[in-house]
Image (tube, grey):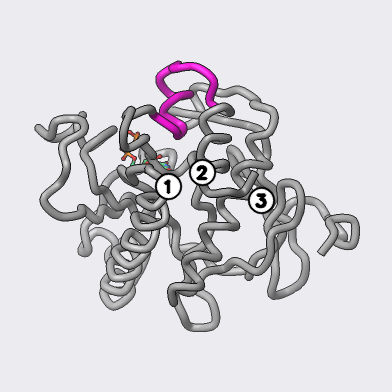
Amino acid sequence: MDINNIVKKGPLYSGKAKSIYEVDEDKVLIEFRDDITAGNGAKKDVKEGKGYLNALISSYLFKKLEENGVETHFIEYIEPNYMLAKRVEIIPIEVIVRNIAAGSLCRRYPFKEGEVLKRPIVQFDYKNDEYNDPMLNEDIAYNLGLATDEELKKMREIALKVNNILKKVFDDVGIDLVDFKIEIGRYKGKLVVADEISPDTMRLWDKETKDILDKDVFRKDLGDVIGKYKVVAKRLKLI
Ligand code: UDP
């Protein structure tokens, strides 16, 4: 599909790095913008080409999930920086999976950065900027009315399945999947993986050099973030 054939009405929603447009009752158009933010919007910049790279990488990874039996909201990649997706009801929970200790895990607990975890950690954080995305447990999620126990159980299963698929995709191109965040939505009574899966939402380290290939380059001022996202896209043979 061509972006010019889609009528873009005003965005339904505009977040820190993506805008969502209504296409019809059942579909949305997701625009990946060049904006980059960190620390809940405290640090901001615009990096040319980021929207394109994230749309491309996200679309590819959603396709991989679908090929491996995980349902997602993905319909189609639309050049250069759009994705057509099913319109879902997003559950406001950031589902994080970790294979190697990094980031907030090391700030909050005595894990050493780079330590390979004995088994993956699945973590649910409440997607709520005002409260700084606090970590949830089942009882808190239930009492806040975010998801049922059955949904939470299924979300954990989906998260671990997604981890296995993505770990293999990156392993095959010499990259360690350190951790990632996904969002899950409700679609026609089912749970589907939604939102984005990109170097903005994953930690990716080169297996050999341990070079950082994700948004930490921006968060920690480590240099050319777009150059690193391009490395990821090149390894996946997308550019
Ligand atoms: N993450 C994300 N959005 C968030 C918080 C985290 O995409 O709002 C991703 C982040 O890029 C990393 C993983 O989730 O791949 C785990 O992040 P962590 O909890 O370590 O938080 P951070 O150190 O980024 O604050």
Q: Is residue 3 left or right of residue 231?
A: right
Could you say which quadrant of the image residue 102 lies in? top left
Instruction: Give coordinates of residue 134: x percent, y percent.
Output: 30, 44
Whether residue 15 is in magenta: the answer is no
Q: Is residue 177 above or below residue 231?
A: below
Residue at left offset 74%, top offset 57%: 78
CA–CA distance in space, label 1 to label 3: 35 Å
Q: Is residue 198 left or right of residue 82?
A: left
Instruction: Give coordinates of residue 196: x percent, y percent.
Output: 53, 53
Q: In this figure, which residue is indicated by the disc labeled 1?
A: 173
Q: Which residues are magenta?
A: 212-225
Residue at left offset 73%, top offset 74%: 25
- As helix, strand or loop, the secondary structure at mark 3 comes to strand
- As helix, strand or loop, the secondary structure at mark 2 comes to helix
- Disc with the residue nearer the chain's start (3 vs 2): 3
CA–CA distance in space, label 3 to label 2: 32 Å
The amino acid type, in three-letter code, at marker 3 is: Tyr
The amino acid type, in three-letter code, at marker 1 is: Val
Q: Are marks 1 and 2 in contact (CB under 8 Å)?
A: yes
Whether residue 218 is in magenta: the answer is yes
- Disc with the residue nearer the chain's start (1 vs 2): 1
Residue at left offset 19%, top offset 32%: 106
- As helix, strand or loop, the secondary structure at mark 1 comes to loop
Tell us which disc is closer to us: 3 or 2.
2
